[in-house]
């Protein structure tokens, strides 16, 4: 299946609260070593699928490489997510300012928000409000259903874990491998306000 055909499936469905989430890995390596411009290829596939003309379905581009996001910022209006692929407990103001120059949001590992020691959370870091104060949305990743992926504080319950990040840490969204669980949580009364993305 071509990229545009795959992307067209998302446009064909009315999926409230769901966006097109593109995660780019190794784009710099592919550009420098293989001479493949992944950024142009992704932009072309999104345009061919009609995402550049749609306003109802949000497109988000995620990368661990700032140069990739800088190029997307120059060429598109898509929401850009900087993925920090290591556990961090804090960030200095100059780093946050640098991130804000090329990204609209930050994806943090779960342990960057709730550090874990011997399978128990130890505290909540101040990273989420610090990034949000700079105007960046914050997403926690990757939430899973398997109880072995959760600290014991969450009682082996994926819904309790989601609630800790949404209501406790007040993240703007979560990245999950189990959208059904997040969707069930989102349908609670009163409905919590957050964004949900799924990995494939």
Image (cartoon, rainbow, N blue to C red):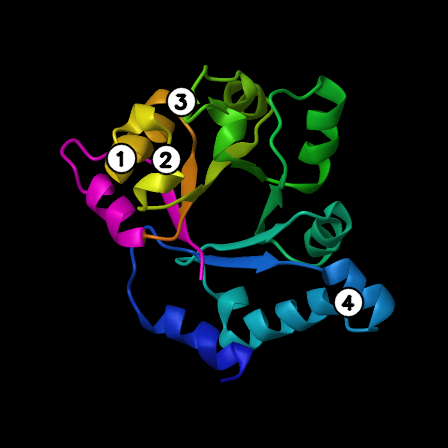
The residues tagged by marks 2 and 4 sit, at their Cα atoms, a distance apart of 34 Å
Magenta range is 179-200
Tell me where residue 148 appears, x and y as whole percent. 36, 40
- Residue 43: x and y in percent read 64, 67
Q: Residues within 10 Å of mark 3 (few under 14, many from 20)?
A: some
- Residue to which mark 1 is pinned: 156
Q: Rounded to the nearest whole Å, what is the CA distance between mark 1 and mark 3?
A: 12 Å
**Of the residues under marks 2 and 3, which one precedes in the sequence?**
3
Residue 132 position in % (x across, y down):
53, 25
Labelled pair 2, 4 in contact (Cβ < 8 Å): no
Residue 162 located within the stretch drawn in magenta: no
Secondary structure beneath label 4: helix
Q: Is residue 188 left or right of residue 55?
A: left
Residue 150 tag number: 2
Mark 4–mark 3 Cα distance, whole angstroms, equals 39 Å
Which image quadrant for residue 30?
bottom right
Quick one: SS at disc 2? Answer: loop
Image quadrant in which the C terminus is located: bottom left
Mark 1 residue element: loop
Q: Residue furthest bottom?
A: 1
Q: Pick whichever of labels 4 and 3 is earlier in the sequence.
A: 4
Q: Quadrant of residue 123?
A: top left
Single out the mark in the foreground, 2 or 4: 2
Gap in angstroms between the C-alphas marked 2 and 3 = 9 Å
- Label 2 and label 1: CA atoms lie apart by 6 Å
- Give the number of the mark in front: 4 or 3: 3
**Dots 1, 4 in contact, CB < 8 A:** no
Residue that label 3 marks: 120
- Write down the residue under mark 4: 30
Q: Nearer the viewer, residue 78 or 182?
A: 182
């Amino acid at each position: 299946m071509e990229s545009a055909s795959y992307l067209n499936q998302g446009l064909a469905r009315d999926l409230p609260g769901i966006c097109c989430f593109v995660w780019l890995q190794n784009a710099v390596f592919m550009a420098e070593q293989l001479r493949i411009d992944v950024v142009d290829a992704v932009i072309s596939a999104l345009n061919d699928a009609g995402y550049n003309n749609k306003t109802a379905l949000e497109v988000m581009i995620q990368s661990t490489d700032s140069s990739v996001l800088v190029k997307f910022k120059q060429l598109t209006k898509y929401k850009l997510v900087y993925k920090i692929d290591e556990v961090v407990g804090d960030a200095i103001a100059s780093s946050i300012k640098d991130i804000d120059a090329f990204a609209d949001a930050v994806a943090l590992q779960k342990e960057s928000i709730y550090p874990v020691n011997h399978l128990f959370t130890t505290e909540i870091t101040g990273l989420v409000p610090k990034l949000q104060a700079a105007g960046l949305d914050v997403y926690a990743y990757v939430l899973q259903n398997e109880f072995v992926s959760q600290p014991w504080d969450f009682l082996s319950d994926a819904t309790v874990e989601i609630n800790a990040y949404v209501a406790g840490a007040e993240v703007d969204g979560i990245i999950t491998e189990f959208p059904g669980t997040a969707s069930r949580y989102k349908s609670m009364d009163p409905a919590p306000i957050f964004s949900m993305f799924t990995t494939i």
